[in-house]
Amino acid sequence: MSLFEYAVLAGLFYGLYFALVGVGLNLIFGVMRIINLAHGDFLMLGAYGAFYIYHLLGWNPLWAIPIELVVFLGLGLPLYYLLVPRLQKSGDPEMLSFILFFGLSQVIEALAVFAFGNDQRSIPTSVFGGAPIHIAGQIYPSSWVVSAAVALIGIVLIYLYLYHTRAGRATRAIMTERSEAVVTGISVHRVSAVAFGIGIASAALAGIFSPFMFGAIEPSMGLGITVTSFVIIVIGSLGNPLGTVLGGILYGEALMLMQTFLTSWSEMFPYVLLILILLVKPSGLLGKAVRSA
Amino acid sequence: MEVILRAEGIKSGYEGVQILWGVDLEIPDGQAVVLLGPNGAGKTTLLRTLLGLLPLWSGRIEFAGNDITRLATEKRVRSGIAFMSELGVFPDLNLADNLRMGGYFLRRSEMDQRISKMYELFPDLARLRRNLAGSLSGGQRKMLGVAKALMSEPRLLIMDEPSAGLSPKYVKEVIEILKVAHAEGLSLLIAEQNVLFLEQADYGYVLEGGRIAAKGSASELKSSDVVRRAYFGMVDENKK
């Protein structure tokens, strides 16, 4: 049974990581009712940030964490004011956001090819100490454990923000009833802009660890990751950022178990899971209906 | 008597459809004013325009002596106008968090003080503070809505149909809650179809087809033809 145990624990590491991958997309959807199709591209940018910090500066990729959090939070605020309030004035912001952020995704990808080239890149896993880590009689790469730990810390911080700060409570208030938040006197745009910043900063944070979790990075990786994130948040339930944790862990477990026991089917499995959930419980496992369509 | 809110020549509507055709309205400081009118008369449109949620096509709004015609909604709320919508609460937030949102821009020390004050005014709320607002009964929800609106220590509370969706027993409860609020020295503007609220008001306006059809003290209005029409309309509706 040790192979099974190995897969389950590996699934947990990957699951926590995938929760971090998806949480930003869900936060932005929950607050603004827009789908950020460029989500995976922000993750890709975060990945290249870590790559260059390691290869050009020779620093440990962990240094990318504080740097990228500041950069992407700072990027998120003006980007919000540039794009989102205009979108929300339209009759169907959700649909329009698909098109607009798909365009943004293509632009980022094209610029990334210019800037970084088309080659696959990676960071040696030995940066977190060469020795693998022994847990419960199993051996795991240290990079998996570090990635999962950082993801867990990131998610806990987002939880603390949402449930124990004034702006975070206001964020949840906007998620539950936007119009009520406006008449309550909450600065809806300011609070949403911060949520947008947190959304893409969490993607960049996940990006820092993507060279280890996905093996390699390339400018075109974004779209696939956006789709993966979408699967995760639909499993957990759209509009409920903490449901993403459940979605991420289920996704990670499913992926690892499939890769271990039914390797050739594993590529397909997440999508089968998505279809099953949409058929059986379309609102997601933790969800109630948050959208009419 | 000092006037807390004065609206002059309000014209407004939705995307090219004019709803309000020059409404004048005054709320004397410390008084309860009821805005009566049937469905579709423009009551909600008028309230939303006063709050700055809808663009004003023309006219002028003055609050506590200041021109607020061009002020953003959140700034109007901060200057002392609280609004209680038909929904009134955040269903997915617990009761304590709803109150915190009502006092969103208060300092921390003030916030805690106001919350204890609300629990004092409405002891039922203190008991339920960990419950989600969405799990409350209709009457409790209105109570929370009023408490949430009072958190910011407003000078004027504007309410959109506080009796909507409530059984007659709860309507009486809501009126009792409003008496508590009014006794705190608050001015009230209540849009209603239910004429029971006129009993509690100092002054009333009747809105019909986006224009003021009648106005006067509560006792004057009760005997006016326009209100009798609306009033009997109301009675009919209750019988259904």
Image (cartoon, rainbow, N blue to C red):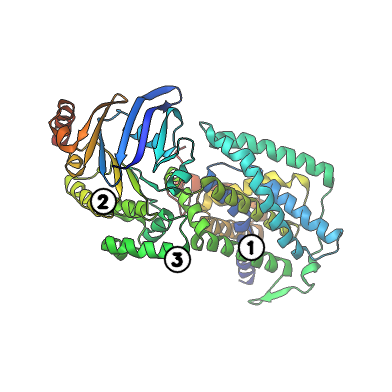
Which residue type does callout 2 highlight?
Answer: His
For discs 1 and 3, the disc positioned in front in the rendered view:
3
Question: At which x and y percent is residue B39?
Answer: 27, 30
Give a yes or no on whether discs 2 and 1 share a subunit: no
Quadrant in the rendering for residue A227: top right
Q: Is residue B48 above or below residue B134?
A: above
Task: Give the quarter of the image for residue B11.
Answer: top left
Q: Secondary structure at mark 2?
A: helix
User: What amino acid is at disc 1?
Assistant: Ala
Counting from the top left corner in percent of width and height, residue A180 is at 42, 45
The amino acid type of the residue labelled 3 equals: Ser
Which residue extends farthest front? B1
Q: CA distance from mark 2 to mark 1?
A: 51 Å
Chain letter belonging to callout 1: A
Front in this rendered view, residue A72 or A113: A72
**Residue highlighted by disc 1:** A151
Residue A179 seen in the figure: yes
User: Of helix, strand and loop, which one carries label 1?
Assistant: helix
- In the picture of the structure, the residue carrying the numbered disc 3 is B109
